[in-house]
Amino acid sequence: MHNMKSFTYITHKQFIKDVKHTPDISIDSIDNNTIKSYMSHIFNTHTIETNIHIDFVKAVFVFTDQSKFQELKRTYIDNLFFSDENRGLFLDFFCKVQKTYWAFNTLAKHIKSRYSKIKVTNDLFLAPILSSQKNMFRLYETNCSYLFTLQDLSRIIISAVCNSPMFYSEPITPKNPYSGIPFSISNLYNIYFAMKNQLAILPNVIYQLFLCEFNLSVFEKNNQLVIRDTYINQFIQNEDEDEVVESIYDMIQGFPKIKLDLEFPDKFLIESFKSVVIHFLHFKYTLDGSKRRIHYTIMNRKMNDIIQNCPTIGRKVFSLVNRKKYVSFVTLTGYSEPVLYVKPATKYIIVQDDTSEDEVAEDHYVHDASNNTSFVFDADFANRLDELIHMTDVPDDNLYDTDDNLYDTDDEIEVNEDLYDP
């Protein structure tokens, strides 16, 4: 006979109550004498008012070695000799046991949670969480408790289920940020009902996730619009700074009147255009066609306001203080803090024949500080240019000698195309 478990113990108690068996059962074990006592009581006390068939089926269910749901399927669903009345009686018996079992289970969980060790008492911003706070939620897992605010839990869940790298939805399971353990379904339900009772406005993403029974596959299939719009709205806060800057420059290409200096700091760039780039991303990536035109109109209006109010935004401004050169930039709120100007080094690097195009584009540039333009010189042309620069004994008249057809007479130096391969 299998060991007595909580569900089995509750089943025995409910069975004794139903058949009005006076002697109680042993908590430690059930022997054959107990089984004989049950069966004898069922058959000896049977009257016309009692249902010996359903009492016998309950007894079989009490002493079965199968799991409760396997036995329920065999007894309640697959049994062809069960009348509708007996099916109802047996289902009532099973539901009473389940209700009692889960009531004790919930009570035990509350007791464990209350007396468990609290590992985290601060929110994600390191502010202390008080047990008296109405928005406090105590998350219990692996015999430990973690204190969260409902706002932090909302951000954690929404960021996970609305995960959309490259604007393609790929929901991931929300996890406890301190332990890395995914939130259980029961904890997600508890979080939802706590939010519903305590928050003035329940986040729509959380509500839609609840309607899908916290099934991520169903949620992704039914809420593409919600996922995309939510991800775009959180793009500035959640995404890498380089991704945000790239999106801003992509937007500015449509407004040629805005000419940003190549050294315009990313910090000022994001501060100036973060309120506009959200509408640009909605216009470009939203799945709702009715919203695309609205966001385009808002983006266009805000960009024109910037152009009108600050037409020189992003320009570099030089100033001299005590014979030192300082540089600052034009922003929406005025000039940035001046910093000492350091002139970029002007140099060229000879490109080898076996250098790939990517390496050339990344490393082998000639930087010109005057116009921020980059060149890549051929080796022969670079050597010839170096010779021309360092030739100090050439008479001035030779610069305008046209016999060799190398130079014009308009004071411009032209490079012989034979010196390099374009």
Image (spheres, rainbow, N blue to C red):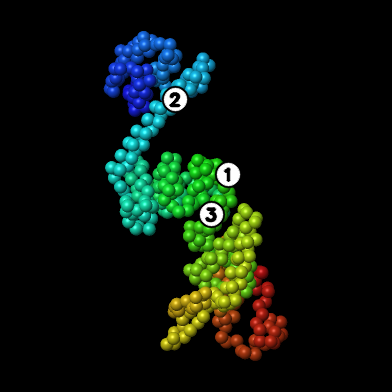
Mark 3–mark 1 distance (CA, rounded to whole Å): 15 Å
Mark 1–mark 2 distance (CA, rounded to whole Å): 37 Å
> With 59 as the anchor, is 355 left or right in this view?
right
**Residue under the image location 50 percent in, 68 percent down:** 271
Sequence-first disc among 1 and 2: 2
> With 365 as the anchor, is 106 left or right in this view?
left
**Residue under the image location 35 percent in, 12 percent down:** 41
Give percent across and percent down for residue 198: 41, 51
User: Which quarter of the picture shows residue 108?
Assistant: top left
The amino acid marked with disc number 3 is Thr
State whether residue 68 is above or below residue 281: above
The amino acid marked with disc number 1 is Lys
Give percent across and percent down for residue 182: 43, 44
According to the image, label 3 marks what residue?
230
State whether residue 217 is above or below residue 291: above
**Residue under the image location 62 percent in, 53 percent down:** 287
Which image quarter holds the N terminus? top left
Which image quarter holds the C terminus? bottom right
Give the secondary structure at mark 2.
Answer: helix
The disc placed on residue 221 is: 1
Give percent across and percent down for residue 67: 42, 24
According to the image, label 2 marks what residue?
92
- Give 332 or 367, whichever is nearer the viewer: 332
Give the secondary structure at mark 1.
Answer: helix
Give the secondary structure at mark 3.
Answer: helix
Disc 2 or disc 3, which is closer to the eye?
Answer: 2
The disc placed on residue 63 is: none
State whether residue 379 is above or below residue 389: above
